[in-house]
Image (cartoon, grey):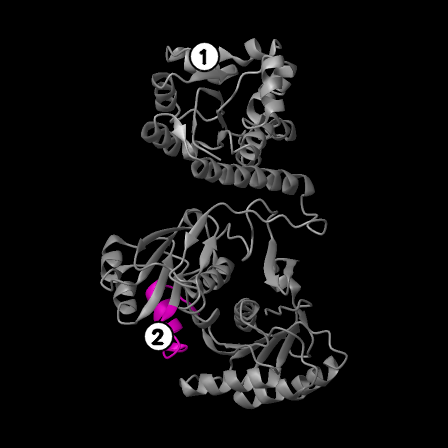
Amino acid sequence: MSNITAKSALISVFHKDGLEPIVHKMNELGITIYSTGGTEKFINDLGIPVIPVENVTSYPSILGGRVKTLHPKVFGGILNRRDHEGDVAQLAEFDIPQIDIVIVDLYPFEKTVASGASEQDIIEKIDIGGISLIRAAAKNYKDTLCVSTMDDYAKLLNVLAEGGGTTTAAQRKEFAATAFDISSHYDSAIYNYFAGDAVDKSLKLSEQHVMPLRYGENPHQRGWFYGDFNSMFTKLHGKALSYNNLLDVDAAVNLMSEFVNDAPTFAIFKHNNACGVAQRDTIHQAYVDALAGDPVSAFGGILISNVAIDVATAQEIHKLFCEVVIAPSFDPAALEILKGKKNRIMLELVGDALSRNLPAGRQGGMPNKVEVRASLNGYLVQDANLKTDAKEDLKTATELEPTSAQIEDLLFASKLCKHTKSNTIVLAKNKQLCASGTGQTSRVDALNQAIHKAQSFKFQLDGAVMASDAFFPFPDCVEIADHAGIKAVIQPGGSIKDELSIDYCNKNEIAMVFTGTRHFKH
């Protein structure tokens, strides 16, 4: 492969922003320009000579513009091999012009789908000629330079200016790699649109936004985030995010999405689990009571609010070393206080990011509500757990009915339980997390851990409620909870030995409700 000095270019683009200086540079370099439709008119309007593709093919644009460039004279000019005698001879035989540069982008398929357009409009945004030209030019990168996105217009202009129209093999190969990235992502988006929720057929993952992270799970591991981070957050301050930061941020956002439009709620996360949560009349009090849940674990944690953070709350937060603070907004004075620690990461939620929060693992172009996780030599895919236990789901299993206040606490605890690693037990009182047992190999261990933790932070568990992510196979958990002062329990139910737990609760005046929904989280 060698350097090639461009003598001709085919330009046919949807996005024309940034194209004008390229066209002027090509004209200056004496490069012959071929074009079609709107792009041809755009170039003509600049007063720069342009040859219509129809003049080359002797065929007009037909079928409402669906067929314009799909012709042997166009693709022959792109795909011919300069060092192949047969190719060179056939160019001459069929009067096919050599095409050295191809600038083509694709119809905005994903944007059209996202706009809620009709199916017909969406179908018309499936590019045929453009994708074919891109693949052809990228395949023949040894002889042809392919520019497949307006994001590369500035880069192309720089290449043309520095090389005087001459490109290197390395440059052409780099543009080709981008072209195949563009085309494969485009095809994945189209497939996922047609497949809908039928992810059991084939898994197409494609994400073009990438953000390098400080490091991976440990400092010796590299890490990246693939996804449109800026569509969810505006980073206002602080050091670069790490892999672990984002896992915790994801856990925090998923939990807080349960409390959109609720009373002020604050949560503190550590290692993907909430170590403090409270809902109060003010966000300041919610933070103070969330911190009281576990002030030890809160050190170095991730903090999240469902409402704006005010000055009083910021002053309290500033006393704590924490990695990340997330909120829908920050009062200007509060933000300045929190910026007092140069490394503290401040994230402002964009628009309705909480209420439109997509489950962890959602990939670009895939249907919503699907979680993806790498496993073994492949991927695990499942529907996201979008079920939130509500009052109408509750079935009282005991003779004693829970009070209205207990029901509120039970549902509060259930939301926390759903977002805590299994096996888990959550203890709550007055819409405050007293403690949780997280990630234990037995439910009894999880309960004992939660009780010990709550008592160590001086919580009075008399009248508290207990939530479990799965059923109790034996009555031991309700018995232990009873001795700790628990007076109401929420659990899925469904064990063949449910009656053992129900009988114990009936004998000891404990209210217990079943939800019918297990909330394992591994």
Membership of 79 in magenta stretch: no
Alpha-carbon span between mark 2 and mark 1: 66 Å
Membership of 293 in magenta stretch: yes
Q: Read off the residue under disc 2.
A: 299
Task: Name the residue rendered at 53%, 52% in the picture.
Answer: 358
Quadrant assignment, res 132? top right
Which numbered tag is attached to residue 99? none
At label 2, the amino acid type is Phe
Task: Name the residue rendered at 37%, 10% in the picture.
Answer: 47
Image quadrant occupied by the C terminus = bottom right
At label 1, the amino acid type is Val
Q: Earlier along the polypeptide chain: callout 2 or callout 1? A: 1
In the displayed structure, does residue 182 sit left or right of residue 333?
right
Quadrant assignment, res 216? bottom left
How crowded pointer 2 is (Cα within 10 Å; few <14, some 14-19, many 20+) is rated as some
Task: Name the residue rendered at 55%, 39% in the picture.
Answer: 180
Residue nearer the viewer, 225 or 291: 225
Task: Name the residue rendered at 43%, 60% in the picture.
Answer: 263
Vertical position of residue 81 compared to residue 223: above or below: above
Stretch of the chain drawn in magenta: 278-301
Q: Read off the residue under disc 1.
A: 50
The local secondary structure at tag 1 comes to loop
Vertical position of residue 60 compared to residue 162: above or below: above
Quadrant assignment, res 23? top left
